[in-house]
Amino acid sequence: MATGREDRARATMESIAFVRPEITPRKQVPLRSLTAIYDRDRYLCRYCGRATVCLPVLRMMSGLFPQQFPFHPNWKADSCHPAYSEISTSNDHVVPVSRGGDSLDETNIVTSCAGCNYRKSDLLLEHLGMTLQPIEHNSAWRGLADMYRPLWEAAGQPTLSTNDKTWMRLTDALYRET
Ligand SMILES: [Zn+2]
């Protein structure tokens, strides 16, 4: 297991090496926790309420339609469809880790659209006049995560990264009959 110090060092290196100013560095929350949190929140941004679309599905769509729906691995603004920086599903620590928030406590982690994630940055909600939206338990929205495997099959079952294979296994367990 990486120590917190290693995580911070990695985050710092990533912010120097890869992350452009409009991108919030990824937190190292396990995928199993993330899929559970996103499912809990119905893939709705807990800050602005809008429906997000999960990243593996967006990337699958970019693989199918690279011209119409471009993707850049570093989310370069001029080479990446704005859906990535605005409505892709991300997670945010309500109390930022830099302000003492627990990095792995699922009650401190919420679904956030990428746009709100960037705007909130490492501030507290009260700094921004933002409030946490309640979970909409009755919403049927699942960020298209429930469509991941059908989309992958429609795309001709392209080779998936290890992370994406894990994502598919976890979302299969949540959304598909076995
Ligand atoms: Zn939002």
Image: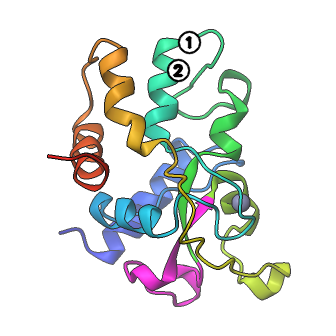
Q: What residue sits right under mark 1 in the picture?
A: 66
Segment tinted magenta in the rendering = 94-112
Above-or-below relation of 50 to 74: below
Q: Is residue 144 magenta?
A: no
Q: Tell whether 61 sits left or right of 120.
A: left
Q: Quadrant of the N terminus?
A: bottom left
Q: Tell whether 132 sits left or right of 175.
A: right
Within 10 angstroms of label 2, few (less than 14), some, or many (20 or more) residues?
some
Q: Determine contact: label 1, label 2, CB under 8 Å.
A: yes
**Residue drawn 55% across and 34% down?**
74
Task: Indicate the colouring scheme.
Answer: rainbow
**Would the CB of label 2 be found within 8 Å of ligand 1?**
no
The amino acid type found where label 2 is placed reads: Ser
Whereabouts is ligand 1, in terms of quadrant?
Answer: bottom right
**Residue drawn 61% across and 62% down?**
112
Q: What residue sits right under mark 2 in the picture?
A: 62
* Residue at mark 1 to residue at mark 2: CA–CA distance: 5 Å
**Residue drawn 59% across and 45% down?**
88
Question: In front: 62, or 13?
Answer: 62
Above-or-below relation of 171 to 42: above
Q: Position of residue 173 (x, y in %)?
A: 22, 53
* Disc 2 secondary structure class: helix
**Residue drawn 67% across and 43% down?**
85
